[in-house]
Amino acid sequence: MDELDEAIRQIVDSISAGLVFDNHTVIQKLIEEYSDTYLSSFSGGTTEGYHGLIIAQKIRDLGESFVILRRKAYSKNIHGKYTECDCWVKK
């Protein structure tokens, strides 16, 4: 497990069971609490592609014993724009 995986696990672990959260929440927490890890893990491309694909996959990789993919959410991203993203329920 790399540093980014561990940071995401810690963020999701801090969410109470039964609560709904989305990718944008995890990304914002990464920026606020794990900015060096988050920024050093970015390897090019667009931030939207990175957020949408890489971060969502890392949350998904936590497994269904930890989170359940709920549907899509519509919330504000780090650029201040409202976009769709994956929505999760913490187990």
Image (cartoon, rainbow, N blue to C red):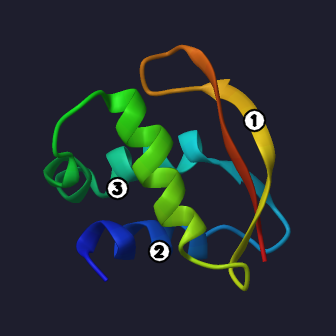
Residue 67 lies, in percent from the top left, at 71, 71
Q: Residues within 10 Å of mark 1 (few under 14, many from 20)?
A: some
In the image, is residue 34 above or below residue 15?
A: above
Q: What residue is drawn where x is 36% and y is 76%?
A: 6
Residue 3 lies, in percent from the top left, at 25, 73
Are the residues tagged 3 and 2 within 8 Å (C-beta)? no
Residue 54 lies, in percent from the top left, at 41, 51
Label of residue 10 in the image? 2
Amino acid type shown at disc 3: Glu
Label of residue 73 in the image? 1
Label of residue 82 in the image? none
Mark 3 and mark 2 lie on one chain; the one further toward the N terminus is: 2
Query: In screen coordinates, is 23 left or right of 7?
Result: right
Label 3 vs label 2, nearer the camera: 2
Amino acid type shown at disc 2: Gln
Q: Which residue is mark 3?
A: 33
Circle 3: element type: helix
Q: CA distance from mark 2 to mark 1?
A: 22 Å
Circle 1: element type: strand
Res. 29 in view: no
Circle 2: element type: helix
Q: CA distance from mark 3 to mark 1?
A: 23 Å
Q: What residue is drawn where x is 59% and y is 66%?
A: 60
Residue 82 lies, in percent from the top left, at 62, 17
Mark 3 and mark 1 lie on one chain; the one further toward the N terminus is: 3
